Amino acid sequence: MKKVPFATKEQLEEICKDYPTPFHLYDEAGIRATARAVNQAFAWNSGFREYFAVKATPTPGILKILHEEGCGMDCSSETELLMCQRCGIVGEEIMFSSNDTPAEEFALADQLGAIINLDDFTHIAFLEQTIGRIPETISCRFNPGGVFRLGESKEGFQVMDNPGDAKYGMTREQLFQAFRVLKAKGAKRFGIHSFLASNTISNDYYPALAGQLFRLAVELERETGAKVSFINLSGGVGVAYRPDQEPNDIFAIGEGVRKQYEEILVPAGMGDVAIYTEMGRFMLAPHGHLVTRVLHEKHTYKEYLGVDACAANLMRPAMYGAYHHITVMGKETQPCDHKYDVVGSLCENSDKFAVDRMLPEVEMGDLMVIHDTGAHGFSMGYNYNGRLRSAELLLREDGRVEQMRRAETPDDYFATLIW
Ligand SMILES: *Cc1c(COP(=O)(O)O)cnc(C)c1O
């Protein structure tokens, strides 16, 4: 699908008068539309709730918009919990899905009334010691091990990931034992959670995962007598970073999960189980742009375009060679007949937003939009080379632009120094 920026060149140049590049810009209308589509796709399930994965975009302005659309928040650290508290999001609107969890964080999650999702069997005792009891509502993370594959074709598998290599979750045996122990210690409402594959471009991922978890839930209830109240499909629903990819259809995904629900849970008398999701990428990635300007052209063994953003603003390309589409603003209709590496300034050769990318002829001063940076973009930022985090701006539905977070200054960088 053709990638079209959600702001025009004129709009961006206007914004640049107040806020220098680089900056992250988010699209309120798009965020609300996606949240509404998700809620509609799962409206057949009366207990449904999307718990937005805060780590994807830990920005209060964004969390508040999602909360207005009915989303809860999925947190995994003290700071993420505190951010929700500051946004007025507390109680069972928080899912605390963490691993290798410090005691203070369990204590804070409990104090805020969050639903706690245990990553390991040993965390039962650790939690009980920490907060002095076992909460009545509790969730356990399941890891089936092995390899997860989906949609075999001549080109290979549509989705393939390695839960067996992942540090998260409990084995099947541990999960059954955990339910028995938790029940004996007073837990009354149980949840199961599992995350088997990341950035899946397939309408079949959630339905396949749901099928596995629904069968497991039926067995868990029968064998342990614990009441399964919710099933958390976690994150992993992907976005089409590349223009040639077919985006996921959330309505087909919701419908696929409904079929599994009606085939497995309803006949088992479990038609009251709530479905939860914890999507980050799907909710936000397409609704953020990293806006950057071309500072330099360099012609050596390759053609380089040096921009004013760097991997400290968006780490995914440097870290995993991830593709992010680039639009040269104002040149959308020109032929992409020039091959460039688009690079940042870090003293790290991996600091390249694009390698051998075909673009229109670019001139110094051109504005570029790097697409799909609304999730795992700003949030993965860092300060290597003394590079500073950029501002985060919100394009309101009425076209106004508001700054949600200012850019860091050198004073911020030096603020933690003792001497
Ligand atoms: C990262 C994460 C998510 C969100 O994953 P996305 O791929 O962004 O949807 C959800 N739940 C947990 C526990 C996570 O760690």
Image (cartoon, rainbow, N blue to C red):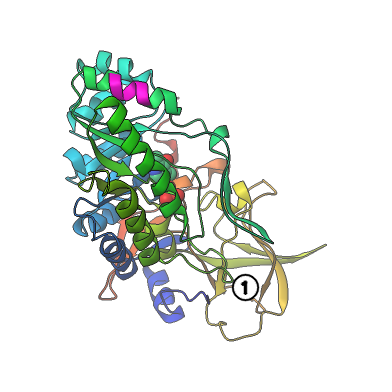
Q: Residues within 10 Å of mark 1 (few under 14, many from 20)?
A: few
Q: Check disc 1 and give the amino acid type.
A: Met
Provide residue 318's location: percent of width, then percent of height: 62, 50
265 in relation to 179, above or below: below
| Number of callouts | 1
Q: Which residue is mark 1?
A: 364
| Residue 396 in view | yes
Position above or below: 194 against 186:
below
Residue 414 or residue 277, whichever sits in front = 277
* The furthest residue to the right: 301
**Magenta residue span:** 176-180
Q: Is residue 36 above or below residue 274?
A: below
Secondary structure mostly seen in magenta is helix
Q: Quadrant of residue 65?
A: bottom left
Q: Residue at x 66, y 84 (%)?
A: 335
Residue at image location 38% in from the left, 71% down from the top: 15
Residue at screen point 41% across, 54% down: 207
Q: Is residue 241 above or below residue 113?
A: below
Q: Is residue 411 visible?
A: no
Q: Position of residue 140 (x, y in %)?
A: 34, 31
Image quarter of the C terminus: top left
Task: Report whether 419 appears left or right of 31.
Answer: right
**Is 209 left, or right, of 330 in this rendering?**
left
**Is residue 335 one of those drawn in magenta?**
no
Relative image position of residue 197 (x, y in whole percent): 51, 46
Q: Is residue 127 left or right of residue 210?
A: left
**Element under disc 1:** loop
